[in-house]
Amino acid sequence: MKRVIFLSLLFISGLGHAWTHMGSNTFGWKQKKLTFYVNPTHCTIPESELYQRIDNAIRAWNGIPNTDLEIVRSSVVATDGDVQFRAKTATQVPLILCSQQLSDYGSVDANAILGFVPYFDENGEGYVTYSGLVLNAQPGALAELSQLAPGEVELIIGHEIGHVLGLGHSGDADSLMYFQLNKDFLLVTQDDQDGISQLYPRNVLGGALGCASVHRTETKLPIGEAAAVLVFLICLFVFGRFVTSTEQPL
Ligand SMILES: [Zn+2]
């Protein structure tokens, strides 16, 4: 029994990590403070509820140790919508919007897919430049936004935000980025955190050369004072010899 457990542990530790990159992406977005824009026009839940779900999903990705990444939701309602997003002329990216016709994005099963990330463009340096997520607002579809529990909506928005940030699917069944959504609540796990930390490493060095300045207390040798003492001792020695010589017994 003990041997089985031991071998299992060895196997697990051999996996290293389960998270993956999205596409060939290497660095995620260049800006470490990333603003998501939301266009609620076609969404089928009240705006205030939509924002609450998105904010909870965003909050789950913030505050991860060892990363500089900070995500915010723009307080300005996006004017870019479905048409601009598909034409890739949207400038308010990453963008979150709802679609009432998922087939506009290709063969997407509206009865199974609540949200998806249709675009993930990178530049030559390996940074993400264009992405966003589409939520299912197709009338009558089983996976339409208003048909799901609040926790499920947050879970899926959180998962899709993970893709937008640059994470692919994880092999860890507990991970938010697991390819099957097997929970009804949002939880960013250590595996998700490790992936984000690798894409957005925290810069602990800082400064133009990447190094912080070093504050050192200078320990000066008191050369001036030592010289003065030395001269004084020499004088004392010479004077002492002189005095001594004049005191020779008669
Ligand atoms: Zn996914």
Image (cartoon, rainbow, N blue to C red):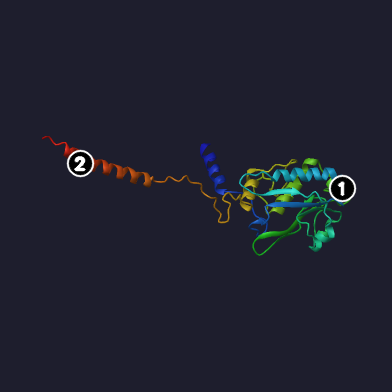
Q: Nearer the viewer, residue 34 or 184?
A: 34
Quadrant (top left, top right, bottom left, bottom right) of the C terminus: top left
Q: Is residue 1 shown left or right of residue 109? A: left
Figure quadrant of residue 31: bottom right
Name which of mark 2 and mark 1 comes first in the sequence: 1
Q: Is residue 55 above or below residue 109?
A: above
Spot occupied by residue 164 in the image (x, y as percentages of width and height): 72, 54
Residue holding disc 1: 44
Q: Residue at x 78, y 59 (%)?
A: 91
Answer yes or no: disc 1 within 8 Å of ligand 1: no
Marks 2 and 1, Cα distance to the nearest angstrom? 109 Å
Q: Position of residue 166 (x, y in %)?
A: 68, 54
Mark toward the viewer: 2 or 1: 2
Q: Secondary structure at mark 2?
A: helix
- Report x, y in % for residue 35: 74, 52
Q: Amino acid at mark 2?
A: Phe
Which residue reaches farthest top?
Answer: 249
**Tag 1, which secondary structure?**
loop
> In the image shown, does 53 or 80 lie closer to the viewer?
80
Say which mark, if any, is on residue 242: 2
Label 2 Cα crowd, 10 Å radius (few <14 / some 14-19 / many 20+): few
Expressed as whole percent of the image width and height from the top left, the position of residue 243 reads 20, 38
Q: Disc 1 marks which amino acid?
A: Thr
Q: Is residue 3 above or below residue 118?
A: above
How many marks can you see?
A: 2
Which residue of the protein is positioned furthest toward the left in this rendering? 250
- Label 2–label 1 contact, CB within 8 A: no
Q: Residues within 10 Å of mark 1 (few under 14, many from 20)?
A: many
Residue at coordinates 57% horizontally, 45% vertically from top-left?
A: 12
